[in-house]
Image: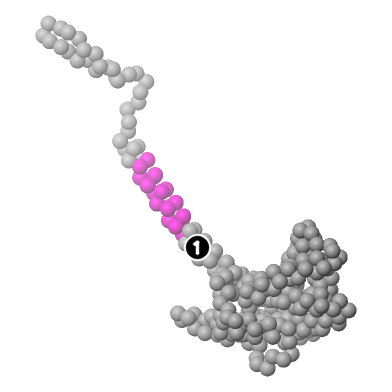
Amino acid sequence: MAIFNTQGEEGCVQIIVQPAGKEQMNPFGDTLYGAGTDLIKTELGAYEEKLFRSGSAYVPGNISRYFSNPQYYFQVSDQYVMNKLKLILFPFLHKGHWMRATETVGGEFSYKPPIHDINAPDLYIPLMAFGTYVVLAGFFLGINGKFSPEAVGLQATNGLLCWLFQVLLLEATLHTLGDGDVPLLDIIAYGGYSFAVVSVVLLCRILWSHCFYVVTLWECFCMGMLLVKIMKRILIAEVRRSENHSSKRHYLLLLVAVAQVPLLFWLGNIAV
């Protein structure tokens, strides 16, 4: 649009010129366009809200299925640690039951934390035992004149690989025999108890190297018995469904127990 001012005899005259080729806006079309846009925005907003709600409900539910609150696994006391170490090293002396204690919090079913239940899994002992294992391995290398940061790092890596193998073995056994929602941190805790056993093996080897094989075989028996008791409890009380084929379950539990022999010998046989 252009505006021209011309000076005539009767005063200033303003002339408005509409540019050619420019279409006039259609009010009816604008109304339809606005209504369609609002409708699309409303539908997209509703779909997005529905998708967000379903995703929000799906993610926490499935995360909690495999992971639980990490703080739960560190609620321990000195008395619990002492009793749990006795249970790990001498499981055949355990006189009580192997079932976990339960409680109701806010109307929801839950397990009592380790500080109130000797059968509850914890991550304090596995992490401390892993650190103790690395320190003892470094000390054993030192007294044999083979200490180096690379050698200690290699032993720590071997320890983590063994931990991973133990977790995969337990997970595979549970998935084969049942369909339970056992938190992954529970399995990591159970697999990490091996370091408490192998730390005793290393300590005995440092004090008297000739007892290595005898102590290792004994601890393999104890660790195998502990894991079989734990796996039986999980399959009976903590899974939704368990296979009825008892022979299949016995063979797999026997495999878990026998697998402790090469695993503990691998951890305890420090290369010097």
Main SS category, magenta section = helix
Residue 260 showing in the rendered view: no
Image colouring: one colour
Name which quarter of the figure residue 267 lies in.
Answer: bottom right
Residue at screen point 72% across, 87% down: 91
Q: Residue furthest top?
A: 9
| Range covered by the magenta-colored residues | 33-50
| Res. 169 visible in picture | yes
Outermost residue toward the left? 10
- Residue at image location 34% in from the left, 18% down from the top: 20
Q: Position of residue 122 (x, y in %)?
A: 62, 76
**Magenta includes 37?**
yes
Q: Residue at x 74, y 90 (%)?
A: 92
| Residue 126 occupies quadrant | bottom right
Q: Which residue sits at x=63%, y=74%?
A: 124
Query: x and y percent of residue 217 in the render?
Result: 84, 81
Q: Amino acid at mark 1?
A: Ser
Quick one: 4 or 89, which is closer to the camera? Answer: 89
Q: Is residue 125 above or below residue 154?
A: below
**Badge 1: how crowded within 10 Å, few (<14), some, or many (20+)?**
few
Does residue 97 belong to the magenta stretch?
A: no
Q: Quadrant of the C terminus?
A: bottom right
**Which residue, given by chain and number where applicable, does mark 1 sit on?**
56
Q: Quadrant of the N terminus?
A: top left
Q: Residue furthest bottom?
A: 95
Foreground residue, 168 or 87?
A: 87
